[in-house]
Image (cartoon, grey):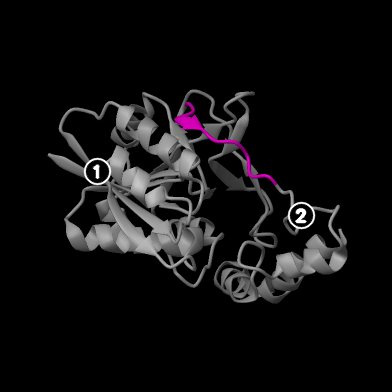
């Protein structure tokens, strides 16, 4: 029996979290697989933990203090899962993502037919209304001088190679997890998935995207973020350096680790292009 640990983190969006779990448990697992779920409730005040426990008592709920955000919440979920059992696979799942009924089949069939001994499979997701691509994986298009310039890979019916992925739906075999390790908690909210994919590629791990969409997820709203040009400049600047923006230490590590010898330029340009472009 192969065991899967599904890792989720959430904060104060109870209805989305419950819908995500409902879709997850409605999925039909391939024969010979068993599923455990680890949910980090990062200090929710809307009753998320209570309602999840009532509706899905099989979920392992891990309490956060409200300071973990996505990356550190997922790091904690993975840490607890790995210490609890020896799992064969780890599945990252955003709590605003709804898996299709055939989501697991697509993910595991991609692994089975990949021909790679060490592979991460990423599931693309689309907008639930328009059916258009929202999150999944990307390829580098900028060459060695622009290591962070990527374009999305749209599902075309066949598995395709990637360089970078979003963390909405990501299936990682244990052999890869042992090689690459956990998400790096130096990243507060975003960038942890980008860093993980780049670290994996440097270690020779193949990244593949499923041939079709595995689920749905609306694109993040930029209202009241540093990308919202209707806000006053001082407020955009404050949001830019906040945890959900481009915090200095996280961006510094990303550029230093993956930006090549031009990393200082990438570091500065990351802020300039948001502030003035």
The dominant secondary structure in magenta is loop
In magenta, the rendered stretch is 212-221
Task: Name the mark nearer the viewer: 2 or 1.
Answer: 1
Mark 2–mark 1 distance (CA, rounded to whole Å): 39 Å
User: At x 57% / y 67%, what residue is drawn?
Assistant: 258
Q: Nearer the viewer, residue 218 or 141?
A: 218
Query: For mark 1, what is the residue?
Result: 57
Residue 232 lies, with reference to residue 92, above or below; the image says: below
Image-based side of 58 in relation to 13, left or right: left
The percent coordinates of residue 256 (x first, y second) are 59, 74
Quarter holding the C terminus is bottom right
Could one spot residue 180 in this view of the protein?
no
The percent coordinates of residue 29 (x first, y second) are 25, 30
Query: For mark 2, what is the residue?
Result: 227
Tag 2 near tag 1, CB within 8 Å: no
User: Toward which corner of the image does residue 220 lie, by quadrant?
Assistant: top right
Crowd tier of the residue under label 1, counting other residues whose Cα lies within 10 Å: few below 14, some 14–19, many 20 or above = few
The percent coordinates of residue 42 (x first, y second) are 44, 60
Could one spot residue 108 in this view of the protein?
yes
């Amino acid at each position: 029996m192969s065991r899967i640990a599904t890792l989720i983190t959430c904060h104060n969006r109870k209805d989305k979290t419950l819908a995500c779990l409902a879709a997850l448990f409605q999925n039909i697992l391939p024969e010979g697989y068993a599923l455990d779920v680890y949910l980090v409730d990062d200090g929710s005040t809307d009753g998320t933990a209570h309602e999840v426990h009532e509706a899905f008592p099989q979920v392992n709920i891990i309490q956060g203090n409200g300071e973990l955000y996505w990356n550190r919440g997922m790091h904690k979920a993975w840490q607890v899962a790995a210490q609890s059992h020896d799992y064969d696979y780890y599945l990252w799942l955003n709590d605003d993502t709804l898996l299709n009924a055939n989501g697991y089949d697509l993910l595991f069939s991609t692994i089975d037919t990949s021909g790679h001994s060490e592979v991460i499979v990423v599931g693309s997701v689309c907008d639930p209304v328009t059916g258009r691509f929202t999150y999944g994986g990307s390829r580098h298009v900028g060459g060695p001088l622009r290591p962070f310039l990527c374009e999305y890979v749209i599902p075309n019916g066949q598995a395709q190679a990637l360089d970078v992925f979003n963390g909405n739906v990501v299936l990682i075999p244990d052999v890869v997890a042992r090689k690459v390790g956990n998400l790096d908690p130096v990243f507060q909210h975003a960038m942890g998935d980008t860093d993980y994919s780049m670290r994996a590629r440097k270690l020779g791990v193949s990244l593949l995207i499923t041939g079709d969409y595995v689920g749905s997820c609306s694109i993040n709203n930029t209202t009241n973020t540093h990308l919202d040009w209707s806000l006053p400049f001082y407020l955009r600047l404050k949001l830019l350096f906040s945890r959900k923006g481009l915090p200095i230490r996280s961006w510094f590590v990303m550029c230093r680790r993956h930006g090549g010898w031009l990393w200082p330029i990438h570091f500065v340009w990351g802020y300039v292009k948001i502030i003035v472009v």
